[in-house]
């Protein structure tokens, strides 16, 4: 339930709403409306609500999912928007290259452009899920996102210790090795090295702003879609998971098996 809860926590913080339990009904309704605006399916919204209900009841509070307005809202959307197949488009290597160029025009500083380039490149070449490398909010201190201590750079490779993931239920951890790309090509090692050279020398989450606050999923998605729109793409058709979809597509084209891609 960690990822659904962190999505809610990030929304509440960015909206300036209280994050303490019990979560008011009005905040829950605003959260669901935001998810619907993002194009999330009702099925996925019900998963979000199940996580919220679990945490709320475990802390001795009521079940926000049992609210009459919440139930009627979801039921209404279910009738209006029946289940559709996943239409998120992949971020291809060509799109990734164009995004990295666009960052210098979209970001407010050179540091931010370097930060987002490293995050975009890592998301693609590492095929990471958002919860594996990004913080839930700017003040996230949960330790769930990728940390500076999880990353080691050599001349030819980027070594990443993924402490937990969706498929690692026992939290044994996995080491991921990303090799350097040939000269002239987009390279995860070069992008990370450039970021670490300017990153503040502090422990904690890997991806942080110059003031030390975390790069959140909300911010990552916002800048991603701004860059996509600037490059002429239908930004709403892409999400953070589009990096993973694109990486899987690229791997399949290169002859990797379905099991290796997973």
Image: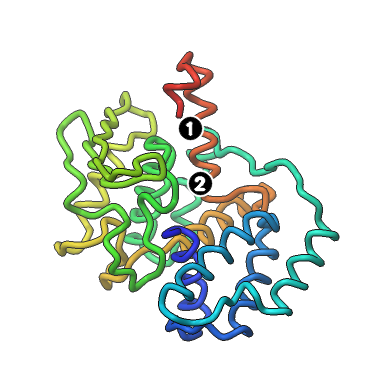
The label shown at residue 67 is none
Give above or below for 122 relative to 217.
above
What's the residue at 56%, 76% (across, down)? Answer: 63
Question: Nearest the camera: 128 or 47?
Answer: 47
**Most distant residue in the right direction:** 80
| Labels in figure, total | 2
> Which mark is in front, 2 or 1?
1
What's the residue at 61%, 48% (across, down)? Answer: 238
Mark 2 lies on a secondary structure that is helix
Query: Would you name the residue on which mark 1 appears?
Result: 247
Percent x, y for residue 233? 66, 47
Question: Nearest the camera: 254 or 173?
Answer: 173
Query: Would you name the residue on which mark 2 appears?
Result: 99
Percent x, y for residue 172? 24, 41
Chain-order first, disc 2 or disc 1? 2
Question: Nearest the camera: 224 or 71?
Answer: 71
Q: Give the CA distance from mark 2 to mark 1.
A: 15 Å
What's the residue at 31%, 71% (across, down)? Answer: 213
Q: Is residue 33 left or right of residue 119?
A: right
What's the residue at 58%, 56% (across, down)? Answer: 225
Give above or below for 156 relative to 241.
above
């Amino acid at each position: 339930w960690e990822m659904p809860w962190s999505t809610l926590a990030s929304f509440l913080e960015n909206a300036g709403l209280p994050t303490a339990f019990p979560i008011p009904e009005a905040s829950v309704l605003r959260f669901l409306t935001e998810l619907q605006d993002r194009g999330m399916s009702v099925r996925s919204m019900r998963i979000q609500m199940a996580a919220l209900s679990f945490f709320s009841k475990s802390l001795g509070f009521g079940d926000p999912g049992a609210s009459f307005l919440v139930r009627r809202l979801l039921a209404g959307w279910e009738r209006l928007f029946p289940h559709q197949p996943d239409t998120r488009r992949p971020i291809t290597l060509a799109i990734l290259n164009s995004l990295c160029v666009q960052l210098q025009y979209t970001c407010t500083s050179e540091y931010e452009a370097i930060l987002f380039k490293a995050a975009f490149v890592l998301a693609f070449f590492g095929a990471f899920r958002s919860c594996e490398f990004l913080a839930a909010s700017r003040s996230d201190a949960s330790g769930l996102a990728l940390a500076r201590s999880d990353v080691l750079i050599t001349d030819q490779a980027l070594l990443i210790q993924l402490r937990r993931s969706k498929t690692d239920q026992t939290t044994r951890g996995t080491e991921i090795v990303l090799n350097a790309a040939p000269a002239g090509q987009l390279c995860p090692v070069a992008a990370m090295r450039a970021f670490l050279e300017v990153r503040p020398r502090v422990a904690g989450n890997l991806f942080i702003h110059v003031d030390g606050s975390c790069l959140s999923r909300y911010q990552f998605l916002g800048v991603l879609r701004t860059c996509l729109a600037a490059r002429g793409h239908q930004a709403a058709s892409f999400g953070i998971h589009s990096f993973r979809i694109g990486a899987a597509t690229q791997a399949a084209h290169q002859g990797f098996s379905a099991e290796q891609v997973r």
